[in-house]
Image: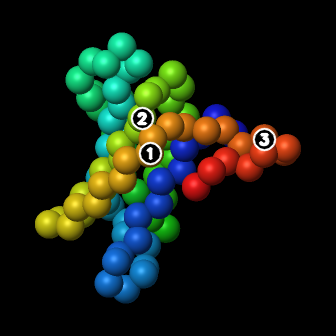
Amino acid sequence: DETLHVRAFSATSGEPVPGATVRLFTRPPQGQDSREIAKGTTARDGLVVFPRPSGTEYLAVTARHGEDVAHVTVPSIQRATPEQPAKE
């Protein structure tokens, strides 16, 4: 799959969070500063889908809804294959 799925849930209720602003940040392998590569808004089910970034050293995902903010850093983007599932 050539897409990256990000889903926002409420830490309090566990319900999906529609309308959250989600941003993807990456650092190119050359060690340049982080930069925003994509921005989207979650749908009614809390999901936003981006084209899968490639050639990244790491990926940071931030989500904001009102005063609530979440941040996750992924060390690398790995693709799942039938022989080897992607690491979580």
**Residue hosting label 3:** 81
Q: CA distance from mark 3 to mark 1?
A: 19 Å
Secondary structure at numbered mark 2: loop
Query: Alpha-carbon neighbours of circle 1 within 10 Å: few (<14), some, or many (≥20)?
Result: few
Residue at x 33%, y 36% (from the top left corner): 25
Query: Does residue 44 appear anywhere in the picture?
Result: no
Residue to which mark 1 is pinned: 74
The percent coordinates of residue 37 (x first, y second) are 36, 30
Tell me what residue is drawn at x 67 percent, y 48 percent: 86
- The first of marks 3 and 1 along the sequence is 1
Contact check, label 2 and label 3, Cβ < 8 Å: no
**Where, by quadrant of the figure, is residue 1 drawn?**
top right
Badge 2: few (under 14), some or many (20 or more) residues near its Cα, within 10 Å?
Answer: some
In the image, is residue 46 above or below residue 56?
Answer: below
Residue at label 2?
Answer: 58
Residue 32 at least partly seen: yes
Q: Position of residue 8 (x, y in %)?
A: 41, 64
Question: Relative to 37, is 71 above or below?
Answer: below
Q: CA distance from mark 2 to mark 1?
A: 6 Å
- Asked if the residues shown at circle 2 and circle 1 are in contact, with their CB atoms under 8 angstroms apart, the answer is yes
Q: Residue at the spot x=54%, y=50% of the render?
A: 5
Q: Position of residue 16 (x, y in %)?
A: 43, 73
- Which of the two residues, 82 or 9, is positioned nearer the viewer here? 82
Q: Residues within 10 Å of mark 3 (few under 14, many from 20)?
A: few
Say whether disc 2 or disc 3 marks the residue closer to the N-terminus: 2
Image quarter hosting the C terminus: bottom right
Q: Amino acid at mark 3?
A: Thr
Could you say which disc has been placed on residue 3 in the image? none
